[in-house]
Image: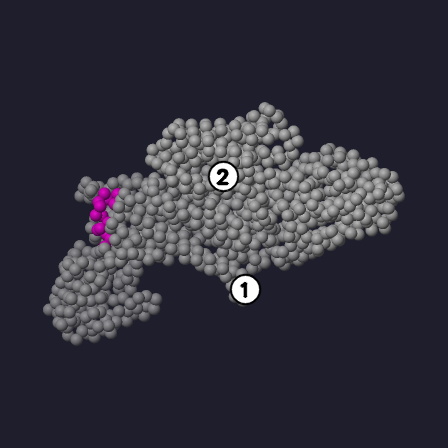
Amino acid sequence: MTAPVADGEPRLVRAAAPARPGWVHVLVWGALAVLGAGAGQALSTTFDLGDIAGAQACLVRNGISVDGTDPVALDQAAYRQCMEDNLRVQATAVLAGAVALPAAAWLLVLLGGLAERWRLRPGRITGIPAASQRLTERFAVLCDSQGLTRRDRPHLVLAPPGTGVTQAFTTGLPGTRPWVVIPLAYAYAEPIAFDAVAAHEVGHVRARDVLWASAVWWAGWLAVPALLLALVPLAAAPEVVWEFYGLSLLVSLVVAVVMFVLRAGLLRRRELAADRHALEVTADPNALARVVKPAKKRRTGVFAIHPAAADRLALDVDAPDREGGFVSTATAGVVAMTTYHATYLVLGSLLPFNGTAISSASVVAALLWASVVVPSWTRQAASDPSGWTGRLAGAVVGLVVGYCLQPPGLSTITAPGPERDLLPLPSLLLVLVPGLVVAAFAVALLTAGLVARLAAHPGHRRPGGLGAALAVTAVLAAAVGTLTGTATVHVATGGTASFRSFLVTNGYDQVWRHTAALLLVALALVVRRPGRPAAVVSGVTAVVGAVAAALSWQLRLDDQLSDARSAFLAYQTWWICALAGLVAAVAVVIVNGGALPELPSGVLCGLLVAASAGGAQYLIRRVRHGGDSNVFQETLQAPGWLLVLALVGTAPLTASLVVMVRRREPRHGAVRWAAGGVTALLALLLVAGGLSGVTTAESDFAQPDTRSQLAEQASPRPDPPVEAEKPLDQAAATAALADVPGVLPPGAKSVPNIPDDSSSVQTPATCDAALDRSIANEKALPRAAEVEQRFTFPLGGRPDGGSISVSITSYSTPPPGFSDIDAENQACADFRQLVSPEENRYYDFHITLRPALDFPLARRRSITGRGQLKGVATLFAFEHYTAIFGLNRVDVALDWFHLGTSPPQAFLDEVERLVTNAMNAIVAKL
Amino acid sequence: MTETPHPGEVGSSGKPVTIADLARRIVAEVEPEQVDYLALVTASWERGAPPRGSRSWTGGTVGSGVQPWVLADLVYPLLAGTLAQVLGASAFARLQRRRWWRKRAVVPSAQITLTPEQVERARAACIAHGMTLGLSESEATMLADAVHGALRRTDDG
């Protein structure tokens, strides 16, 4: 194919502009920000900008160890007070580094462009022969043929021999017209040689390759010096540098080398893209052969920025673009996850108790990853619909390695707030990595399905691309945020129950509660019409799921349903809806042939099925039992969140299943209806307890009942004392408490009593009134003796994990019983305390009445407060046991704190045993 | 600091000729339209600023990776390689100059004198160096003939 000749010169053909690798800009500036953040924190540490010595002294003064072994979580206020300034300075330094290093790179890019222009300044371009005029005119023709005008039109510089320019190249300054520099020698070469070289350079101009190439170049050169600069104060002690920053220095060196290697590899591909542009513009398949001389060397080194001559000469114009494969996807994952660490460090330091720190960091990282990978994969999928293995593997490797990689100089781990000093990183990673691998695979699979769908239906690529990016962001952010929180809780508490509970209940997080809804909207932008087979499958599974969910609730309904049982049944119904959605998602993909573009349809149908089933069972429950509940929560939030968990968790399994049964043609008939049967089977299995291990178990909600049973296993119950006719004196009352320390764990120590008005819990007005009345009535009673003792003791692996207060009050007249306590329990049964209005952070308090059958006149109650602390569910409880024996009232109050939704059973057993034993020890002495 | 060889010191017989004259004769014979361009190339070599390649320390350039193949650019490297082989290393070194930060480069104004035997050897050396520079055998042979012819005409006076 040769272009027709006009006016003695071959006609130039308008060619499509080579794809612009905009994703490289996102990655390189993101990487620079992360490197800068690391250097910023190192600088903050080495220059001691935050007065760490003062902060540590403050911690010690408040009884908080600085070696990371004390449960600082118990005293958040003290920790915050001591560390606030240090953390703020540290966050500021990290932010400053994250801005300064990209700014420095930008400045160097500008200076580099200016240096190139200085090298080719007009004063040096003199004595150009008249023959060069032909090149100038031809270049204008070339630019016109490609529609390059105004700032898009490059400026041609013909470089005479004295400038040292031997090869054509493109250079540019941001915001100005690029320069195409071509050796004057081309004026004496074949005309086609100039055409080919000029079209090649114009290809670079149209792809805007110069800026990113320059940015990556400087990023590589700045990686190590930035960290070294931060370590200057330690220059006199290289052994200290090596001990604390040796790994960081090695990592930054590796990062620098990798940047140069990646830059070279990408440039080699951009050269081929520019060659392709030259071939299209000249419409001469031999154009490259006129300028590229064959060479013996068949392969290039990793730092070579040009492909081998043989590769250029064998270039296929129609060959698919190979960008967006394993390497670029893995790089995106690493940059995104290291950005997560840096963002989390800043947010966690500036807002130490902000529950959205993990969520926000996850969203930032996921947005970065999606904004790079979705466009890149979409272009790839359009030109090469196969070859997903490398991209999927790149996604998994990049995200997992990036999460495990500490950015050079940055000292952060995934645990939130002060707990990060307590939780060992290896333990966290051990728990996290398997989950991350599965989650990364699921997200990569969803991304592949979305971009394959966009490539197969290119009609609405713009809104579809936005929807794909949103969907990927939603799922990846939720996966990373939830896994981080879950692993933290799991390592801190142990046991699978906490793991399972956190996964399930994290759907109530103020960010993640919208995940299913956002995913639904995003998928609707990508998938306009799922198709009739999908509608049939969805309808069947939705009906079966709704019926099964409603029956599972209705058939087990009981008038004596406790709160715990009620919560358990509610979660089971939502799980049934989610399982119906899971079956629908898989079945839709299978009936549509099992191809990758059908995946978004499947997920969309699954969400619709889960929401429909959730809505139906909500309506049935509402009509039959009334009550006030949240439609969004019951219909979409809870079933949708559980479906997202199920889709992510089962991705390897369901993907294997689809691969095994897929076929080219859509399936008809029984397969569609079988989805209903599978849904019913799974629902039965769930209700029968066969899926409790991976969904929900009654024990997750049944703490009070469990503990009631445990009371029977506590120390032998003493006989009730003979009711005293005379009140105790102070000495006798004190003696009655003498055996309490003996039932406490080793390490218990006596501490001063807390004044009555020291409670920081703000209660509603009705509750306040009840409490005030109770206190006033109690104080009004004449008394002969009153003794209270308080102890702290090790609990849950923490030295002062529990605190117990025991007291005896001996009245002159018989006390009136527990009417005031009963009134308190009624008035304060449920209330919410707003901890931070700005952050919408609160605690939900609930009083649970417990059976107190050991003594004739006794009351037991558990006052629990549930909330979130920096994105991690927290629970604190106050166990109160009181009994009256004649003129004497005995009170035992034990309070504990737990990071997570549900403490391990052993922990609860220990609490139960201590409360009962303390009461029994006192009663035995009366 | 520049070292310029003295006339008459290079060859043992025949008339001295500058390398620039030799290059001009070759280009005029093979590619006469490049003679004015050769003047620019000669001036560049004379200033001690031979082509450096396009790699930039700024990282702000994206090059084509290919060089134009015109005789005027090739003639000095070709003559340099040929003369180095024919004259021997020590004699050739005196045709060069260097600044401490730059590679050695031949000076076009340097004069050479070749014996008839060296002139004959120059042809084969020129073919070898032309092929080393990336020319095909036929292109290298054509240039070698031009070099040989120019040297003979110099000897012939």
Q: Percent from the top left, x then y, of residue A280? A: 26, 43
Q: Does the rendering let one see residue A524?
A: no
Image: A9 above or below A255: above
Marks 1, 2: nearer the viewer: 2
Residue A779 included in the magenta stretch of the image: no
Q: Is residue A261 above or below residue A810?
A: below
Mark 2 is on which residue type?
A: Ala
Counting residues from the start of the chain, the first of labels 1 and 2 encountered is 1
Give residue B101's quadrant in the image.
Answer: bottom left
**Residue A56: assigned label:** none
Q: Is residue A809 left or right of residue A478?
A: right
Estimate the x, y position of residue A796 in percent, counting from the top left.
65, 50
At horizontal 35% and vertical 57% (from top left) the residue drawn is: A303
Quadrant of image for the N terminus of chain A:
top left
- The residue wearing badge 2 is A646
Asked if residue A853 shows in the view, the reply is yes
Q: Position of residue A632 (x, y in %)?
A: 55, 31
Q: A617 or A640, which lies in front?
A: A617
Image: magenta residue range: A277-293
**Main SS of residues in magenta:** helix
Q: Mark 2 Cα within 10 Å, few/some/many (few <14, many 20+)? A: some
**x 18%, y 68%: residue:** B17
Nearer to us in this view, B71 or A40: A40
Whole-percent x and y of residue A445? Answer: 42, 41
Residue type at tag 1: Val
Taking the spot 44% from the left edge, 49% from the top edge, the residue there is: A398
Q: On the image, numbered disc 1 is attached to which residue?
A: A240
Q: Residue at x 73, y 48 (%)?
A: A715
Q: CA separation, marks 1 and 2?
A: 48 Å
Q: Dot 1, how many residues are within 10 Å of its Cα: few (below 14), some (14-19), or many (20+)?
A: few
